[in-house]
């Protein structure tokens, strides 16, 4: 396998080559020269490469062919699980079984179909097996619905390409306008497509701490691991760009054979860097050496050994690179030429009568990028405005007062004259009926006619609400505080969490736990809290309200209004 020229050994000026392999380049951004190193290695490798721009205003990789964002929709369990975990920044537990059944039901149909089924379940109140949702099932589907609602719009309305065409050299995929979760989806889709259908392609994973995190899941982690294990067979390689290694998942790092370690300024990260150098402790560089590496100078640790090397930029000639490696001239005295392409599109080249003509369309490209960014900013502003207007309309409708027909009738009877003894009489029922006909009907809220059954139901609804309020108002301050915390969490929580997060204790001794248990006993006594199978407390206020109101045929909106009203009273 042909090797790739990296640069020159510091001190001797001897050429340094590396094997074509999976590699990682680390170092402080803007000060170590990571991007220049990757750009030079890609061009000297002779392979195709896909790089991703993920930060707005990012200046890395200024030369290459810009390709459209690529995404292939999926709804398999592992993919959706990692996607939701990346969005929520927490691991799924109770949702796993439900998510597996949803993935099976939507096999090959994508995330939108999965969201449609979740919406149908929430609307009908019955799960995929046509069984009525219990409190736990409702919790699971509510969380899944919320996560999918926030993820899908980012990929549904972004005009993404469903074909991946990779040109020779560097291919730049601009993902600046997308959220971190959407970026993860596209990087995963590209790596999966290349692994399955292409050869001789390098995938450059940026910001490894973000897309290959150690503490939680991400759609990129699984495919990068597969790419690292299987890709080299077809001359496909993963190159990782990371400022540091502290938060990077260690499973894909185990497949890395070439480590190009640059300048670090923080002591703990220097120690992480030294741990990756395959030398006895006495022969390793010192911490001060790592903290004093200049731009473009790296410690190369690979199968062939450990070398301190100056990486030759693609635009620098051999003579200057050797002199910098030997220390004869300083890197600060060398400036990159001004004729480098400033944007992510290579100049178009045409030929006329044997003379090469170069057209620099960088200004046009820059304006197009700015217009595109401005367009998406305006769309976002419009969405926020629409949401604010919808909230105001809802608030106005919810504040409308119902007409109290009983009060109207009472006042009308008071105004009516007393019948005289001349034998004439007044038909009160007929007058009341005529008045009620002229009372305007309201929109947005129910108007009760003079019907005994409806009025009875309405009174019972009001009495049920007042009963819950009275019970809560009689609680101690600790019990009220605990109820607020449980309702805000909406899941079962441990006593240890309640001690520290709800009541603010630094330790969970006997007296602190007793305070929590006493408050919890109060809530259980009036059925606004309960324990799960692991004896963890959970709020049950809405369940109590449902039990009280459903017997009177209350609608879901009425139940929700009572629930929100009681929460407001608690505040």
Image (cartoon, rainbow, N blue to C red):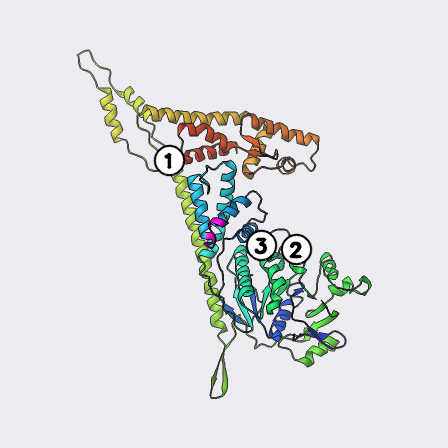
Could you tell me which secondary element the residue under label 2 belongs to? loop
Q: Nearer the viewer, mark 1 or mark 2?
A: 2
Could you tell me which secondary element the residue under label 1 belongs to? loop
Residue drawn at (37%, 35%), measured in percent from left and top? 400
How far apart are labels 2 and 3 at the CA level?
A: 13 Å
Q: Position of residue 57 (x, y in %)?
A: 55, 63
According to the image, label 3 marks what residue? Answer: 218
Task: Work out which residue is located at the far right of the displayed protein and give it.
Answer: 282
Q: How many residues crowd around disc 2 within 10 Å: few (fewer than 14), some, or many (20 or more)?
A: some
Q: Position of residue 97 (x, y in %)?
A: 54, 44
The part of the chain drawn in magenta is: 104-111
Q: Is residue 171 visible?
A: yes
Q: Position of residue 412 (x, y in %)?
A: 28, 23
Q: Nearer the viewer, mark 2 or mark 3?
A: 3
Residue drawn at (38%, 26%), measured in percent from left and top? 457
Check the image and report above or below for 463 versus 171. above
Check the image and report above or below for 542 versus 409. below
On the image, which quarter does residue 122 sit in? Answer: top left
Check the image and report above or below for 369 versus 347. above
Q: Position of residue 183 (x, y in %)?
A: 53, 58
* Nearer the observer, 254 or 276: 254
* Image-based side of 538 in relation to 298, left or right: left
According to the image, label 1 marks what residue? Answer: 400
Q: Tell me which numbered mark, 3 or 1, is placed earlier along the sequence.
A: 3
Residue drawn at (73%, 56%), measured in percent from left and top? 268
Q: How many residues crowd around disc 1 within 10 Å: few (fewer than 14), some, or many (20 or more)?
A: few
Q: Which label was assigned to residue 179?
A: none
Task: Work out which residue is located at the far bottom of the displayed protein and give it.
Answer: 353
Task: Work out which residue is located at the far top of the displayed protein and give it.
Answer: 421
According to the image, label 2 marks what residue? Answer: 247
């Amino acid at each position: 396998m042909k090797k790739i020229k990296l640069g020159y050994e510091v001190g001797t000026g001897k050429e340094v080559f590396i094997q074509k392999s999976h590699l990682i380049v680390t170092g402080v951004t803007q000060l170590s020269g990571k991007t220049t190193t990757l750009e030079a290695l890609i061009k000297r490798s002779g392979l195709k490469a896909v790089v991703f721009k993920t930060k707005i205003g990012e200046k890395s990789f200024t030369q290459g062919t810009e390709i459209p964002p690529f995404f292939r929709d999926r709804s398999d369990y592992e993919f959706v699980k990692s996607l939701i975990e990346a969005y929520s920044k927490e691991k799924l537990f109770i949702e796993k079984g439900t998510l597996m059944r949803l993935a099976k039901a939507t096999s090959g149909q994508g995330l939108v179909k999965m969201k449609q089924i979740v919406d149908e379940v929430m609307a009908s109140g019955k799960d995929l097996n046509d069984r009525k949702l219990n409190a736990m099932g409702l919790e699971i589907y509510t969380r899944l619905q919320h996560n999918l609602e926030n993820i899908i719009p980012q990929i549904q309305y972004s005009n993404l390409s469903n074909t991946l065409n990779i040109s020779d050299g560097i291919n730049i995929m601009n993902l600046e306008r997308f959220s971190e979760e959407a970026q993860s989806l596209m990087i995963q889709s590209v790596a999966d497509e290349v692994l399955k259908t292409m050869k001789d392609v390098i995938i450059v994973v940026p910001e490894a701490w973000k897309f290959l995190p150690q503490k939680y899941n991400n759609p990129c982690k699984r495919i990068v691991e597969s790419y690292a294990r299987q890709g080299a067979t077809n001359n496909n390689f993963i190159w990782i760009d990371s400022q540091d290694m502290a938060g990077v998942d260690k499973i894909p790092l185990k497949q890395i054979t070439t480590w190009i370690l640059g300048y670090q300024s923080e002591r703990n990260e220097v120690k992480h860097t030294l741990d990756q150098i395959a030398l006895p402790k006495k022969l390793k560089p010192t911490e001060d050496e790592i903290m004093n590496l200049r731009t473009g100078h790296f410690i190369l640790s690979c199968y062939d050994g450990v070398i301190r090397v100056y990486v030759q930029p693609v635009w620098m000639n051999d003579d200057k690179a050797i002199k910098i490696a030997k220390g004869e001239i300083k890197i600060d005295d060398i400036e990159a030429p001004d004729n480098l392409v400033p944007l992510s599109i290579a100049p178009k080249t045409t030929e006329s009568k044997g003379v090469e003509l170069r057209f620099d369309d960088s200004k046009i490209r820059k304006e197009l990028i700015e217009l595109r960014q401005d367009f998406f900013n305006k769309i976002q502003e419009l969405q926020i405005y629409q949401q604010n207007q919808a909230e105001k309309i809802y608030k106005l409708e919810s504040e409308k007062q119902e007409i109290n027909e009983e009060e109207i009738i009472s006042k009308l009877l008071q105004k009516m004259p007393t019948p005289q003894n001349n034998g004439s009489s007044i038909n009160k029922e007929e007058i009341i009926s005529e008045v009620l006909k002229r009372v305007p009907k309201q929109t947005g809220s129910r108007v009760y006619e003079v019907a005994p059954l409806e009025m009875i139901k309405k009174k019972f609804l009001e009495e049920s609400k007042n009963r819950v309020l009275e019970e809560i108002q009689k609680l101690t301050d600790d019990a009220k505080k605990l109820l607020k915390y449980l309702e805000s969490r909406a899941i079962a929580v441990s006593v240890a969490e309640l001690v520290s997060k709800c009541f603010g204790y630094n330790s969970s001794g006997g007296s602190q736990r007793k305070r929590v248990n006493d408050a919890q006993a109060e809530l259980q006594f009036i059925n606004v809290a309960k324990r799960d199978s692991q004896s963890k407390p959970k709020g049950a206020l809405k369940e109590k309200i449902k039990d009280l109101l459903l017997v009177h045929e209350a609608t879901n909106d009425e139940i929700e209004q009572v629930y929100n009203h009681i929460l407001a009273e608690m505040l």
